[in-house]
Image: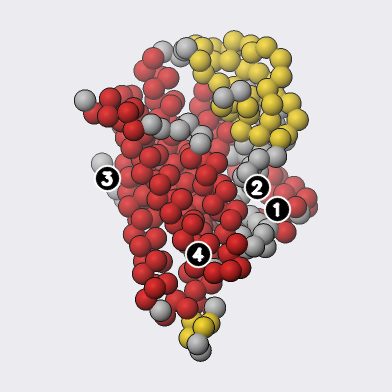
Amino acid sequence: MDVRLTAEQRQLRAAAARLADHLGPGSVLDLDDGDRIARLEKAVEATGWRALRSDGASGVEVALVVEEFGRGLVDVPLLGPVLADDLAPGVPAATVVVDGGARDARGLRKGVFAEGGRVLAVDIGPLIPGADLTRHNASVTGPPERIGTLSAETCARRRALALVATTADLVGTARGAHTLAVAHAKLREQYGRPIGTYQAVAHLLAEGLASIEGSVSVLRHAAWAVDELTPEEALRAARIAKLYCARAARTVCETAIQVHGGIGNTWECLAHVHLRRALASTELFPVRLEEIDRGLS
């Protein structure tokens, strides 16, 4: 595995980062800014990134875009449509359905999912608010319609990509929370000095950065494995990455709240939005330890 990104991959990551920085929410109040959301939706639609896989993008490239969107708390659908495009290329305005509910569903009215080798399409109903303030759920309405079939190997590889994409969102969300905490530690002063100069805070932030760097490494390997290893090996790598990064992201996001002190427990502080997103992504395609043990035996 060559861990270096190509020039095209670096450009893709930079473009996703610019979009997230420019139109992603900069505060909790921005989450209710309809004009910003409309401009963000238009910009994301124009990029064509929701059809990355059918356009020939690798698992690494999908992970790069999703990670930057997680870092910037981008609050229009990307994760669901990318996975739906991988399951059923050409199905318009699709999201992915998990446990009877459509996730990442703002503005979308069709969902797809795989079950027993069959690819099924369903209509989705009104949006349902959830713990994640940057994404929406929706109820599934009507009977499913069969639109395709998948082999066992293809199902495993699609599952690996789904795990990698949600893992990338976790890593990006953790990066965003850590950046927020570092910025606060540089500005907030106690006893005449920025709180980041005190070891108690500095060590927490250093440990968070180490966790993020480890998460990036395990994520990149899993993303590479989606296309380069066997379906079983790719699925095993994705499961390990999801479990590792979910735990790391929760710790980093909770640390960001602690670094903010009292204000970190208020609605106005953006840190809790990162934690909510991390918890929601953890529950998308969850991984159990016994699945990894079984795969390694």
Badge 4 or badge 1: first in the primary sequence: 1
Q: Nearer the viewer, mark 4 or mark 2?
A: 4
Question: Label 3: how many residues lie within 10 Å, few (<14), some (14-19) or many (20+)?
Answer: few
Mark 4 and mark 2 lie on one chain; the one further toward the N terminus is 2
Disc 1 to disc 2, C-alpha distance? 8 Å
Q: Residue furthest bottom?
A: 192
Q: Mark 1 or 2, which is nearer the eye?
A: 2
How far across and how far down the image is residue 193, in percent? 48, 86
What SS does tag 4 mark?
A: helix
Tag 4: Cα neighbours inside 10 Å, few (<14), some, or many (≥20)? Answer: some
In this rendering, which labeled residue sits more in front, label 1 or label 3?
Answer: 1
Left or right placement of residue 102 versus residue 119 in this view: right
Do labels 4 and 1 touch, CB within 8 Å? Answer: no
Element carrying mark 2: loop
* Between discs 1 and 2, the one toward the N terminus: 1
Q: Is residue 18 above or below residue 157?
A: below
Mark sitting on residue 133: 2
Q: What residue is at 55 percent from the left and 53 percent from the top?
A: 274
Q: CA distance from mark 4 to mark 1?
A: 23 Å
For the image, the number of numbered tags is 4
Residue 39 shows in this picture: no
Quote the CA–CA distance across marks 1 and 3.
39 Å
Instruction: Write down the residue under mark 4.
Output: 258
What residue type is disc 3 on?
Answer: Asp
Q: Name which residue type carries label 2.
A: Leu
The alpha-carbon separation of the residues under discs 4 and 2 comes to 20 Å
Q: Which residue is mark 1?
A: 31
